[in-house]
Amino acid sequence: MTAIPIFIISDSIGETARTVIAAVNAQFPASVTLKIQRFPFITDQKTLTPILQDAHQEQAIIVSTLVNHTLQETVTQFCQAKHLTLIDLLSPLTTAISERSQTASLETPGSLRKLDEHYFHRISAMEFAVRYDDGQDPRGLLEADIVLLGVSRTSKTPLSMYLANQNYRVANLPLIPNVPLPKELFKVPAHKIIGLTMPLSTLLKIRQERLATLGLPQTTNYSNMTTVGDELAYANQIFEQLNATTINVADRSIEETASLIQTLI
């Protein structure tokens, strides 16, 4: 079967149309093939006209995501005159919302993808979480919005990354008996410190599963009941010393724990 030509015309990058086409294409067997051509950043009639002429020549299906009403009207009239199939992804919903709200749309190309201040804060927070993960640099403890403490396998790293995606600067530190704590930790305000814990039986099971996944023997201190119990007792002692808020993360998803932390700080 000859590939079906599809022209994506957009005044941004055309990613919305590409995603929709991919979703539709997945509903057909492999014998149905598409020849997709993307024409991004179309912002004037001079650039648009030859694209429409090529679409007519190839008898292409046109998929448009033009926010500019004038350009979209040009595409619509051309397709009607040349009997081309047009899928206008934005206009129907834009019109409906505009009529319901009695508000004109902005007609600003690429608004969905603009790199605003919130975006840059989030990226900065994620870089912070990576830099100060697992106690790599104790200086980060003093700069963090949230400091997570806990023994191994209490979800410190995934929680740090999830909270970073919510724009929080998070540092985390593993608590290990007989390993000195950095002096910076004792300068962090108590309300910023969250202690993560769970019952001994739950932590043992998680660690045993971790060792099995790695193909390592179970006969190590990492999954020894006495050793793990000592770790938890030490962690609780540190939490009390720092007046930290303690959260039992057993049976809680990362999202649930993160939401709880946000209400506590």
Image: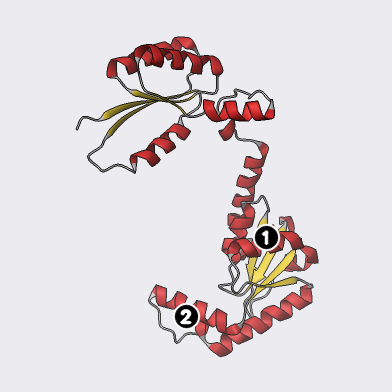
User: Residue 85 versus residue 136: which sits nearer the camera?
Assistant: 85
- Residue 183 seen anywhere in this rendered image of the structure: yes
Residue shown at 64% from the left, 72% from the top = 150
Decide if residue 230 is on the left or right side of residue 83.
right
Residue 212 appears in which quarter of the rendering?
bottom left
The image position of residue 40, as x and y in percent, is 45, 24
User: Residue 261 versus residue 172: which sits nearer the camera?
Assistant: 261
The image position of residue 69, as x and y in percent, is 55, 18
- Residue 139 seen anywhere in this rendered image of the structure: no
Residue shown at 67% from the left, 66% from the top = 148
The image position of residue 45, as x and y in percent, is 48, 11
User: Residue 205 versus residue 86: which sits nearer the camera?
Assistant: 86
Which numbered mark, 2 or 1, is in the foreground of this view? 1
Decide if residue 55 is on the left or right side of residue 120.
left
Amino acid type, callout 2: Gln
User: Residue 27 versus residue 107: which sits nearer the camera?
Assistant: 27
Residue 27 appears in which quarter of the rendering?
top left
Checking the image for residue 259, the label placed there is: 1
Checking the image for residue 85, the label placed there is: none
Q: Secondary structure at mark 2?
A: helix
Residue shown at 58% from the left, 66% from the top = 253
Q: Marks 2/1: CA distance?
A: 28 Å
In the rendered image, the residue lying farthest to the top is 46
**Residue at the spot of label 2:** 208
Residue 7 appears in which quarter of the rendering?
top left
In the rendered image, the residue lying farthest to the bottom is 226
